[in-house]
Image: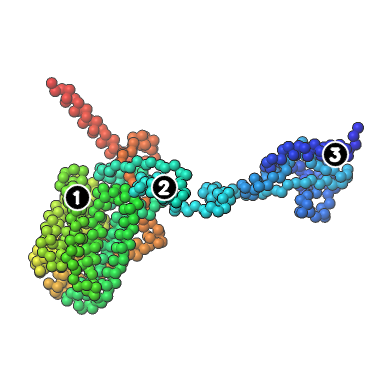
């Protein structure tokens, strides 16, 4: 027979052997007796001998517990869950594993029958929320590799393989540069197929709105919708409209300062100098950014060129340069070299050969199908070039471009007024884009007056047409309601400024109180409009930060989505607009089926 002390020694040795065998990983679950917690069981603590006045020794990491005799009363074991304070501490520390309830005597070291027992415990870990997402991965990588810097979300955005189809080199140049620097990329190269030219019909089928920049229901895009695209992909060609609006203002203030009929205003010529310098700086910034887009994302530029509305804005950079040449202050230079006119008009002539040829060809881009008010940008360049050439003393070249512009403006004007059933881009309601109707006749009146040497009947006819269109649009009270702001609105400001400049020129020929009052009124309206758009642009750029949203217009798929299956599943939760689209789709399919069946019946009946 062994004494109680010898039995306890045997139990301790077995417990130590058991603890050494199972102390590889700290246990998250341990058995805690109710009598190990002070004040847990009031009835039990009445029978226990516990010195509450004795303080706990934190350095020895021991807690007082009840005598061993009380460990054998009947009760249900309690469960405690202990989590490590961080994922890495579980690997850095290796505390002893504690046995469950039936083996807890193995770690008990009795001193006496009535003496309190002490139990050695490992350091406790308190539960804390574990970080998830990108931050957790970055923290883990920084712990494993302290010298490695955290990742930048903008850099990760540029390295996203889903944008490779729009890159000029599809990411190959970046990988070659990394290999030359001795840092080969570990990511596998993704060969994204280069998409084909998107047809005009796909733009009409996938997009809607006066500017064809709103995705239709059930349509999909080839770029990710859940994240913000790189800045160059979101930078549209319509940004040059800002240059048109500001540079045309410099021309207006130059005429106010130099025309005799407006000398009563006492306009300082330095206003023209300040606006011209701002216009030049603005053009350099906008053109540099878009040049970077051409270099790095040529596919996006190509898709903008095939867009039936965006293609007209490719005339905007050259028209802005013509405005800068016309509005150059006299303090800088009074004469311009002739070769400058030929340099500026050459790209306009090349674009016109392409665009006007498509209008006449009768294909997908015929004028009756793609006609929209933004086509005036492709026409007004002829009159602006003719006006600049005439001021420089040229004759034949300005007359040539004036004749080309007049012919195509007449055809475009009639097409837009007719609203042919084949035309799908004309908005049902008014939009600021309609102010482009005023641009061509107002600039044409000044161009012909400069070519002919006087503001004769031909110039007055064009001027009166411009004034009638201007007033017919201005009387609409609710004109600017319900439209989302975009950079394309800047292109609609220079027609108002052009109308004001032509009025100043008309006032110099017919000088009276009415014409002077009209000149001051139109100049004031044009200036306030440009100032209002400038404030709105600044707010959207720096306050709302939505000036350059994801450009959906360039990311449409070149294939039609499978709409029948989606309509079958979404039919119950669709809106009235979606149901209308669905009915049109079904109706068109039924007509095609009926037509095919009728054709087959006729072929079968013919002998």
Residue under the point 29% across and 69% down: 277
- Estimate how packed mark 1 is, as few (under 14), some (14 to 19) or many (20 or more) residues with alpha carbons within 10 Å: few
Q: Nearer the viewer, residue 270 or 260?
A: 270
- Estimate how packed mark 2 is, as few (under 14), some (14 to 19) or many (20 or more) residues with alpha carbons within 10 Å: some
Q: Nearer the viewer, residue 174 or 204?
A: 174
Vertical order, 242 against 602 (above or below): below
Vertical order, 224 against 566 (above or below): below
Where residue 344 sits, quadrant-wise, is bottom left
- Estimate how packed mark 3 is, as few (under 14), some (14 to 19) or many (20 or more) residues with alpha carbons within 10 Å: some
Where residue 36 sits, quadrant-wise, is top right
Q: Which residue lies under the disc numbered 2?
A: 175
In the rendered image, the quadrant that contains the C terminus is top left
Is residue 49 toward the left or the right of residue 146 in the image? Answer: right
Secondary element type, mark 1: helix
The Cα–Cα distance between marks 1 and 2, rounded to whole angstroms, is 37 Å
The Cα–Cα distance between marks 1 and 3, rounded to whole angstroms, is 101 Å
User: Which circle marks residue 9 in the picture?
Assistant: 3
Q: Which residue lies under the disc numbered 1?
A: 354
Q: Position of residue 313 (x, y in %)?
A: 25, 55
Q: Nearer the viewer, residue 80 or 310?
A: 310
Which residue, as the protein is rendered here, is positioned at the far top?
607
Is residue 34 toward the left or the right of residue 288 in the image? Answer: right
Q: Nearer the viewer, residue 361 or 526?
A: 361
């Amino acid at each position: 027979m062994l004494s109680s002390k010898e039995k306890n020694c045997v139990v301790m040795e077995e417990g130590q052997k058991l603890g050494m065998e199972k102390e590889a990983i700290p246990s998250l679950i341990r058995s805690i007796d109710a009598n190990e917690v002070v004040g847990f069981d009031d009835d039990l603590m009445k029978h226990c001998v516990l010195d509450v006045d004795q303080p706990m020794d934190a350095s020895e990491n021991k807690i007082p517990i009840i005598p061993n005799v009380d460990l054998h009363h009947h009760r249900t074991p309690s469960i405690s869950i202990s989590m490590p304070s961080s994922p890495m501490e579980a690997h850095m520390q290796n505390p002893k594993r504690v046995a469950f309830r039936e083996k807890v005597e193995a770690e008990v070291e009795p001193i006496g029958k009535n003496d309190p027992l002490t139990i050695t415990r490992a350091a406790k870990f308190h539960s804390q929320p574990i970080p998830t997402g990108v931050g957790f991965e970055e923290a883990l990588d920084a712990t494993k590799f302290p010298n490695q810097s955290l990742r930048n979300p903008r850099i990760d955005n540029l390295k996203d393989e889903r944008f490779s189809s729009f890159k000029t080199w599809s990411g190959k140049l970046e990988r070659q540069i990394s290999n030359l620097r001795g840092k080969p990329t570990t990511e596998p190269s993704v060969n994204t197929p280069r998409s084909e030219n998107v047809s005009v019909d796909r733009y009409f089928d996938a997009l809607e709105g006066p500017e064809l920049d709103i995705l239709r229901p059930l349509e999909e895009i080839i770029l990710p919708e859940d994240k913000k695209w790189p800045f160059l992909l979101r930078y549209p060609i319509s940004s040059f409209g800002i240059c048109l609006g500001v540079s045309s203002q410099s021309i207006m203030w130059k005429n106010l300062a130099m025309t005799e009929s407006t000398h009563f205003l006492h306009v300082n010529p330095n206003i023209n100098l300040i606006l011209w310098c701002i216009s030049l700086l603005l053009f350099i910034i906008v053109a540099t950014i878009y040049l970077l887009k051409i270099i790095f994302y040529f596919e996006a530029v190509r898709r903008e060129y095939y867009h039936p509305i965006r293609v007209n804005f490719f005339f905007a950079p050259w028209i802005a340069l013509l405005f800068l040449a016309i509005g150059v202050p006299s303090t800088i230079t009074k004469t311009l070299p002739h070769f400058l006119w030929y340099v500026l008009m050459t790209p306009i002539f090349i674009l016109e050969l392409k665009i006007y040829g498509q209008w006449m060809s009768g294909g997908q881009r015929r004028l009756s199908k793609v006609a929209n008010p933004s086509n005036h940008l492709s026409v007004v360049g002829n009159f602006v070039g003719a006006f600049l050439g005439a001021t420089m003393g040229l004759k034949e070249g300005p007359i040539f471009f004036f004749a080309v512009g007049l012919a195509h403006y007449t055809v475009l004007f009639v097409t837009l007024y007719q609203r042919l059933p084949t035309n799908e881009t004309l908005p049902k309601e008014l939009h600021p884009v309609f102010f482009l109707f005023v641009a061509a006749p107002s600039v044409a009146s000044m161009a012909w007056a400069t070519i002919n040497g006087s503001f004769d009947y031909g110039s007055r006819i064009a001027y009166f047409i411009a004034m009638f269109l201007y007033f017919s649009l201005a009387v609409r009270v609710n004109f600017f309601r319900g439209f989302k702001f975009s950079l394309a609105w800047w292109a609609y400001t220079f027609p108002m400024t052009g109308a004001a400049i032509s009025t100043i020129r008309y006032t110099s020929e017919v000088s009276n109180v009415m014409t002077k009052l009209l000149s001051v009124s139109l100049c004031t309206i044009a200036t306030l409009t440009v100032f209002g758009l400038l404030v709105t642009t600044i707010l959207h750029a720096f306050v709302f930060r939505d000036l350059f949203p994801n450009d959906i217009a360039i990311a449409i798929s070149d294939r039609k989505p499978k709409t029948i299956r989606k309509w079958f599943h979404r039919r119950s939760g669709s809106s009235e607009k979606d149901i209308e689209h669905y009915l049109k789709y079904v109706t068109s399919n039924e007509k095609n089926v009926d037509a095919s069946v009728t054709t087959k019946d006729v072929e079968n009946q013919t002998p």
